[in-house]
Amino acid sequence: MTTQATIAVAGDHADTPIELLAVNLADPTGHEVLISVKVTALCHSQLHHLASTRKRRLVLGHEATGTVEMIGPEVSTLSVGDTVLVTWVPKDEEQANRAARPASVELADGSVAVSPNVYTWGTHVVADEMYVLPLPEGIDLDAASLLGCAVITGAGAVVNTAEVQPGQSVAVIGAGGVGLCAIAAAANVGASPIIVVDLVDEKLDMARAFGATHTVNASNVEDPIAEVLALTPGIGLDFARQPVAGADYVFDCIGKPATVTQALQMARAGRYTLRRGGMAIVVGVPTSALSLPPGPLLTGERTLIGSIGGSCSPSRDIPIFIEWWKGGSLDLDRLVTTRYPLERVNDAVADLKAGRIEGRALLEVPS
Ligand SMILES: [Zn+2]
C-alpha cells in the first residue's frame, strides 16, 4: 500500500527552487509512523540546507503538527489517531540510542530525496517515532508546531545549556523566533536584566512583549557591545584592571562570526582568582569558520559554548514549555506572525531569506 502525498523537494544543487511533487509514500515500516501534516514552520536552518553543496535532492522542514495515520510494526510510543508534533531532536535517551535511518522519499522518477533526520514540508510525512511526540488534547496545533524547533532551541539554551539562575543577567542577540523563545525562558527563570540586541525596531518591540527589560537597536548605536556593558555593571576590576561589566550569559541567536565575537565581548569578564567570567552561547547556526579575539576568552576567563536543540530532551522539556504557554509566560500564539499555504513555499522561503518574517512563519496544509 502507499499514500498519495505532496512533498516539497529541493533540487540536487544549491539554491534551486523548491518543487511540490506528488509522490506515493510507502507504508511505514519498523519504528516509522505516517503522519498527515496540519501545519509546519520555517526555520533559518532550512535556508542553510537550501544553500548547501550537495549531490542529492532534499526534503525539508523539521517542526510540525498533525495526526498519526499509520504505524510501523515496531512502534511502541504512538498510536493511530494521536495528535502529534514532529521535532528533529530524539525525544528521549532510549530513543536517541536507537539507530535510525535518514529520512528519504522515493520520487516518481525513481530518484530519492533525503533528510538526515525528518522532513515536514508536505501533506503527509513518514518519520521515525523517535522524532514524534503525542500532544495533549485541545492544544492549538498552529502555535504548537513551534515547539519542535524554535521553542526547544531558544528556551532550551537558557534552561538546559546555560542553566540561567534567578537574578543573573542575560543578553540575547537576534529577536527572531528562536531569540524570542530564549527571551521568554530568561524571563521565566527570573533573569534580570534581559537585554536584547537586534537591527529592527519591530523585532525589539516583540522582544519587550516576550520579557526583554532593555533593548538595543544595533543599527542606531555606535557600539552595541558598549551598550550592553553599560547596562550590566559588575563588581571590582578585571585582569586588565578595568571595571568588570557584561552579562552573565549572552545568547547569540544569529550565528554569524561577527555576532559570536560580539557575544563573547558582551559576556562579563572574570575577576582574577575570584570569579570565572560569563558565558557566550552559540545558538544560531554558524556557516563559516569563527575567528575570535583571544583576550576576552583567556584573560576574561569567559566560556564559549554551543547549544544544539537547546540541549533538550523533548519528552522531558516540551511539557514544561507547554505549561509556560498555557500560563501565559511564553506567547506562542504571538510568535506566529505569518502564514502561507504549502503551495506558496517558495514565497515563504524568499520572505524568510529577505528578513521579512518577524516571529515565525507557518506553512498550512489544506485540509
Ligand atoms: Zn529549526
Image (cartoon, helix red, strand yellow):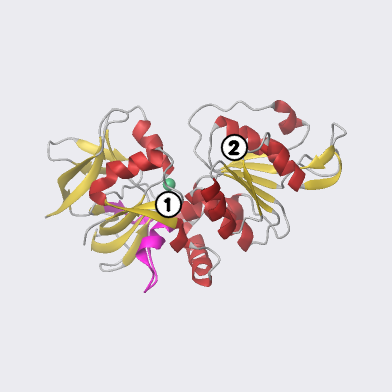
Q: Which of the image's four quarters has the N terminus?
A: bottom left
Q: Is 129 inside the magenta-drawn segment? A: yes
Give the SS element for disc 1.
strand
Q: What residue type is labelled 2?
A: Ser
Q: Residue 118: give x, y in percent of width and height.
A: 33, 47
State the extent of the magenta-drawn residues as a range. Answer: 126-148
Please name the residue shown 42% across and 52% down the image.
Answer: 360
Earlier in the chain: of badge 1 and badge 2, it is 2
Please name the residue shown 56% across and 66% down the image.
Answer: 329
Q: Residue 249: give x, y in percent of width and height.
A: 67, 47
Q: In this view, does 61 lie to the left or right of 109?
A: right
Q: Is residue 19 left or right of residue 274?
A: left
The residues bearing labels 1 and 2 have C-alpha atoms spaced at a distance of 22 Å
Q: Residue 357: give x, y in percent of width and height.
A: 42, 47
Q: Which of the image's four quarters has the C terminus?
A: bottom left
Residue 136 visible in image: yes
The label number, if any, that marks residue 360 in the structure image: 1
| Label 2, ligand 1: CB separation under 8 Å | no
Q: What residue type is labelled 1?
A: Arg
Q: Which of 259 and 158 is in front in this view?
A: 259
Residue indicated by mark 2? 219
